[in-house]
Image (spheres, helix red, strand yellow):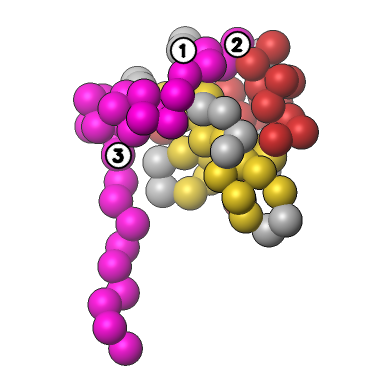
């Protein structure tokens, strides 16, 4: 089981965030996140949003540190990338 995490460089809600992904399956990703006590509400389409204060903990648990572009490449390569739904003009 290999999971990947990018650096916490994504701002939102007053903090910085990382993305935790699998290049194998969503089941693998959910199992890993559940083992860390990451709530399911942190799952967004194809990744978990991980706050910066938990980054080191997730790495210690076995996630491999990669750059943000590598996260996207891994998701596309595995076929697990889910694009945002576009609501279109209102």
For the view shown, which residue lies furthest in the right direction?
53
Q: Position of residue 18 (x, y in %)?
A: 57, 35
Q: Position of residue 4 (x, y in %)?
A: 48, 21
Is 73 within the magenta? yes
Looking at the image, do the residues carrying marks 1 and 3 touch, with CB atoms under 8 Å apart?
Answer: no
Question: Which residue is found at the position 43% from the left and 31% from the top?
Answer: 68
Q: Compare marks 3 and 2 and give the one earlier in the sequence.
A: 2
Residue 62 got which mark? 2
- 3D distance between C-alphas at marks 3 and 2: 22 Å
Residue placed under numbered mark 1 in the picture: 2
Left or right: 36 in relation to 21: right
Q: Who is closer to the viewer here, 84 or 38?
A: 84
Q: Tell me where the magenta segment starts and ends, as one range.
A: 62-90
Callout 2: SS: loop
Left or right: 65 in relation to 79: right
Looking at the image, do the residues carrying marks 1 and 2 touch, with CB atoms under 8 Å apart?
Answer: yes
Is 75 within the magenta? yes
């Amino acid at each position: 089981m290999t999971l990947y995490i990018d650096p916490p460089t994504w701002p939102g809600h007053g903090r910085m965030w990382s993305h935790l992904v699998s290049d194998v399956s969503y089941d693998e990703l959910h199992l890993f996140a559940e083992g860390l006590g990451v709530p399911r509400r942190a799952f967004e389409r194809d990744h978990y949003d991980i706050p910066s204060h938990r980054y080191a903990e997730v790495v210690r648990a076995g996630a491999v540190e990669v750059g943000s572009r590598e996260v996207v490449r891994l998701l596309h390569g595995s076929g697990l990338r889910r694009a945002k739904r576009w609501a279109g003009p209102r």
